[in-house]
Image (cartoon, rainbow, N blue to C red):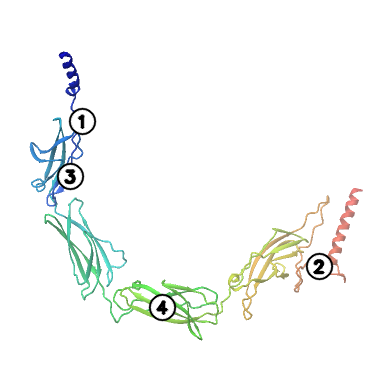
Amino acid sequence: MKLTLSVLLLLLFLPTAMAVNDQPVAKASVNPNLCFACECQSITLDASGSYDPDGQVVKYEWYYGDQLVAEGIRATLGKPFITNPDTYKITLKIIDNGGMSDTEEVVFYVKNNPVPYIEKLKNRTNSNYDYLVIGDKISVEVILSDKDYGTITYNWDYDSEIFRKTGDKGKITFKVISSKAKSNHEIGVIASNLCGDESNRKEIEVKIKSSSSNSPPKSEIILPVQIYEGKRFQIKSGSTTGQRGDEEDDEIVSWNWKISKITNRGEEEITTSSRKYISFTVENSGELYNVSLEVTDRFGEKGIAWQNFHAKEVEPDPPIADASATEKIAIYGKEFTLDGSRSWDPDGNILREVISSYLWYDLTYGEYLGSSNSPTFNVMFNRTGLHEIELTVIDTGFSEDSESLSDKDVIVVNVIEEAITISTPAPTSTLVSIPPKAQPTCAPTCFYLPESQIIPTPETPGMGFGLAAIATLIIAIAVRRKNKH
């Protein structure tokens, strides 16, 4: 019975006696891992990432070599570590509740503070001017050589009666608050590390100009030589900046234009502009206007000018003639269409001008063919061969007192005979050999035959041409019948 009880007790405590303790895991970090000797305040060691899988970590020890330098889940290192530049390796050792341990190493660096070196001062001012006036600003940035200097302080030297400084570190803006007889001023800077080591000195030279009470800008208005009603024109500024040495016209920084209509009740403002020029259209030549201009230069001084103007009745442009035809070749004795529809009047959109007349003239034979209000014109040519046809276009004028304007264009028309589809050769035409006599102005269609084929008749004009054509046809038919027999 006693043996049985002993066996039961052994079985009860056997799992506990045979349990295995797992090793803890050490995790260490350091902050900062790099610092400069003259600015390090402390080095912080952290083991909060460590853990024990089957229990708990009960002890944290930090060693520098074999020397225990700190204990605890978090620890701080001060002197002599932070004041002596070197590479430091610190080992974390943790122990769990079962006596098991683990270690991890961290590294941090303490460096000497380098002596700063300034390569240049960069002027970041966005300006087209190489000098400043009161109210202007200049932005300056310190460019150090390509090194890690740690914390740097900057000592700027400048005339505080001339400049006001804003900004911090190596980017500073200076505003000109005053000017003196001396025009050139220096802005310098020295950089220092926290050990007190100073850099080389760099400076920039700033040229400052002051305004003069007896040299305000000269405001000038430049109007076009001719101003016509209904046509837009531009008024320009010819302002200069007075007599201040080498200053140029581009020192004008603002323009204030105003155009007013002068009436019996005074001036009525029409439009304003802040550009270097102003555009305007006078609708009625009988109206009087005033334009004024106030300019301001970089020194804040102003110049004023004004001028009255009115418009003339617009000078009209002539129409543009453009002659063409609906076909390339004209057939003798058949109606042919001349076309002037591509002609146009440049003033039509503004002055309501349009082309009123299209006149056609045969330059080759000195014949006036006719005119119409329509751009197309039908005509029958009574002579074969090439004809130079001149088109004259006339506009309506833009007022009762204005004269109509005209333009001319010429095209060449080739007039041919229509082919005769009979077996025997057609008689040779003589319609092109004899030039015409001088002819008076005639109706829209004119045709003249050579004298050898004109048959006098008191009847309706054109009857002679018809009888001749009938006689020619009868002869051709007779010849054809004879050949058949």
The reply to whether dot 3 and dot 4 touch (C-beta < 8 Å) is no
- Residue 188 in picture, x, y percent from top left: 18, 64
Gap between marks 2 and 1 measured at Cα? 138 Å
The residue where tag 4 is placed is 293
Q: Nearer the viewer, residue 369 or 387?
A: 369
Q: Residue 33 has which mark?
A: 3
66 in relation to 163, above or below: above
Q: Earlier in the sequence, mark 3 or mark 1?
A: 3
Does the CB distance between marks 4 and 1 fall below 8 Å? no
Camera-side residue of 24 and 248: 24
Q: Amino acid at mark 1?
A: Asp
Q: Counting residues from the N terminus, which is met first, the one under dot 3 or under dot 2?
A: 3
Q: Nearer the viewer, mark 4 or mark 1?
A: 1
Compute the Cα span from label 3 to label 4: 67 Å
Can residue 404 be seen?
Answer: yes
- Mark 2: which amino acid? Glu
Q: Which residue position is annotated with label 1?
A: 54
The residue tagged 2 is: 451
Where is residue 417 drawn, in percent x and y? Answer: 77, 58
Residue 388 relative to residue 185: left or right: right
